[in-house]
Amino acid sequence: AAMAPGKKITARIKKTLPVRGPQAPTLRELMRWYCLNTNTHGCRRIVVSRGRLRRFIWILLTLSAVGLIIWQCAELLLNYYSASVSVTVQFQKLPFPAVTICNINPYKYSSMKGYLSELDKETKKALETFYGFSEGKSKVRRAAGDWNDSESLFFTQIPLLRFEDSSRTATDLHSGRKRKVEGSVFHKDSSIVNSGDSNDIIGFQLCDANNSSECALYTFSSGVNAIQEWYKLHYMNIMAQIPLETKEELSYSAEDLLLTCYFDGLSCDKRHFTRFHHPLHGNCYTFNSGENGTVLSTSTGGSEYGLQVVLYIDEADYNPFLVTSTGAKIIVHDQDEYPFIEDIGTEIETAAATSIGMHFTRSRKLSKPYSDCTETGADIPVENLYNKSYSLQICLHSCFQKAMVESCGCAQYAQPLPVGAEYCNYKKNPNWMYCYYRLHEKFVKEQLGCQQICKDACSFKEWALTTSIAQWPSTVSEDWMLRVLSWDKGQKINKKLNKTDLANLMVFYKDLNERFISENPANTLVILLSNFGGQLGLWMSCSVVCVIEIIEVFFIDSFSIIMRRQWQRAKKWWNHRKRDGTGRPPELGDTEQQGHDNPACIDEDLPTFNTALRLPLPQEGHMPRTPPPNYSTLRLETAFTEQLPDTLEPGQH
C-alpha cells in the first residue's frame, strides 16, 4: 500500500534527525541532551567545557551548589513549623479573678477531739518517750517500757524507728527493742549527707501486708518531720472514714473566718463567697467564683479598689500535731480553674497586713504541629476528676489517682474520688500505705507514665503576684481596733480578740494593663516557596520552570526509557519462546540470529548513527550471507526423446 505524502515526510525526518529527549535509547544520551538544553548553566558547562580539569571543576561546583540547595531547603522545611512570640499590652477594664481563702488549720481542734483522741494520746506519749517532755510536767525522758503493755494500734501499723548506725540496726521507739530492718531506704526530706550522730535519723517502716519481707524504710533528718508525717498518715486514715457533710460541719464557716469585707470600695459579705471543701484544708471560701454566672470586674487599679478582708484565724483551736504554722492560705485563679492550694497557695501571716498586687497575663500557644499542647484536654487519655477546665496539674493528679485505684484498690484521700472508688482506710485496705508510698515513688521518678501522657494547656491565664507585708494593727491603734472588731464579731466569740488571731488581706490590680502573649506561625506557604526560589536562583540560576524540567527529565523520561528497555527484553523473550516452543532464549551460536535478528536492531524506533555503531562485529569464519540457490530446481524435464534439428548447434549434425 502506498504511503501518504505526510507520513513519508515524517518518516524521512525521523530517519534523518537524531533521537533526542525522552525518545533517546539510553540514559546517557538523555542526560547529554538535558545538559545541552537546560537553563541551569552549570550542567551545560560540564558538557561543553574542553579539558578534563575544567570539566572536573564544573562538576565539583555544580555538585556543591546542589548540595547547598538541598541543605538550605531542608533547613527551611525543618523550621517551617516554628513560631514567633508577640506581646500585646492593652489598657482596659479587667475581670477580677477568683480568690480562694483557707485557714491553714483545716478543722477546729475542739470539734475533732472525739475522732483524734486516741491518736493524739499516742503521739503525746511518743514525744514524752523520745524527747523527755510532756505537757505540764518537767522534761524527764521516760523509758519505752514505762508505757502500758497494751499494744498500740497506731505503732503496730506504722512502727517509729531510731536508726542506731549504718548497719541497718534500729530501735523501736514504742517497745524499746532493737532489731534488724530490711528494705529500700527513702529519705523523705531533701537530700542529706549524714554528717552528725546517726541517732538523729528517725523514720518508720512500711511493709507489704501480703508479703512481710517486702518493706520500705522512710527516714527523716528531723524528728519533727518524722512525727508529723507519721501523724498525717493516721490522720488521713481517720478522715477518710468521716462523711463529707460531717467534715464540713467540723470545719470553719464563713462567719467564723470572715470578719470584714470590701471590694472596689463597697462593702461585701459571705454572700459573695462560695464554700469549697478541700480534703487537706477543710472549708475554703472563694470570692467571685462566678458560680451564679456573674464575674465582677474592676475599672481602677490600686489597693483601695481591690478585695480587702480581715480574717479570724483562732490560733487557740489549731491542731498542734497537724500544722506548725499559723495563718491563712490564698490562691488567685480563674473562675474555671481548680485552686490547688496545697501546691501553689500563698501563706498569709497573722498580726500583719498582707498586700498582694497583681499583673494579668493571658497566654496562647499554637497547638500541633507547632507545640505539644492540648486545647481542651479531650485528646488526653486521662479522666478529669476535678470538674474544672483542663490544666497540667489536674491531669497529673487525676492520672496518679487512677493509678492508685488500679494498683491499691482504693483512692488517695487528698484527691477527688473516681466513680465507684472509696478512700483508703486500714479496715478495708490494710496495705494502702505501703502501696501509696511505692506508687508515689514511681510517680516522682516518672515511671508511671503520667508525665509522658499529660500535656500543657495551649491557653491559660496567669496573675503574677507581688506581696508586701506590714505590721497590723499598729501599736497605737491596736487597742481600739481590737475592741471594735470584737464588738462587730458580737456573740460569735466568747473571748477578747488577740491580734495574733487576725490577718488583714488586700488583693488588687497594680495596673489595668492586660498583657497578651501569643504565638504566631513564623512561616507560611508563600514565604516557604519564596525562600525555595531564592535558594534555587542563588546557587543554580534556576526557576520553577527549571524545577519542572528536572522532574520531567530525571523522573518521567528516565522512567520511560527504563520501562521501554524492559518491555523490549520481555518482547524479545516472548518472540523466541513462540519460535522454538521451549521458552529457552537462543544462544549466540544459533543460526537464527543473523541479519535483522540482531538485538541492537530490535528497537522499534528508527535507527540512528549511534545505534548503528553498537551493532556487533561479524564473527570470523562465519559471514552472514544469502544462501545459494538450489540448482536442482532449475532442471528441465522434457517429453521429447530426441532433440529437434533446429535446436542443434553448428557442428552437431
Image (spheres, grey):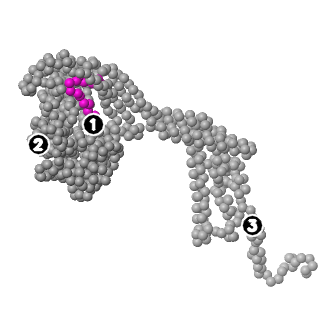
Q: Is residue 576 above or below residue 19?
A: below
Q: Earlier in the sequence, mark 2 or mark 3?
A: 2
345 falls in the magenta region:
yes
Q: Residue furthest top?
A: 476
Residue under circle 1?
343
SS for callout 2? helix
Residue range corresponding to the magenta coloring: 343-358
The front one of 234 and 131 is 131
Measure how far apart labels 2 and 3 are at the Cα level.
Answer: 117 Å
Q: Main secondary structure of the magenta part?
A: strand
The residue that disc 2 covers is 117
Question: 628 or 569, which lies in front?
Answer: 569
User: Residue 437 location in percent, x, y?
Assistant: 26, 48
**Which circle's residue, 2 or 1, is located before the other in the chain?**
2
The mark found on residue 619 in the picture is 3
Can you say whether 511 is above or below 33 in the image? above
Q: Where's residue 20, x and y in %?
A: 66, 48
> Between residues 55 and 404, which one lies in front from this camera angle?
404
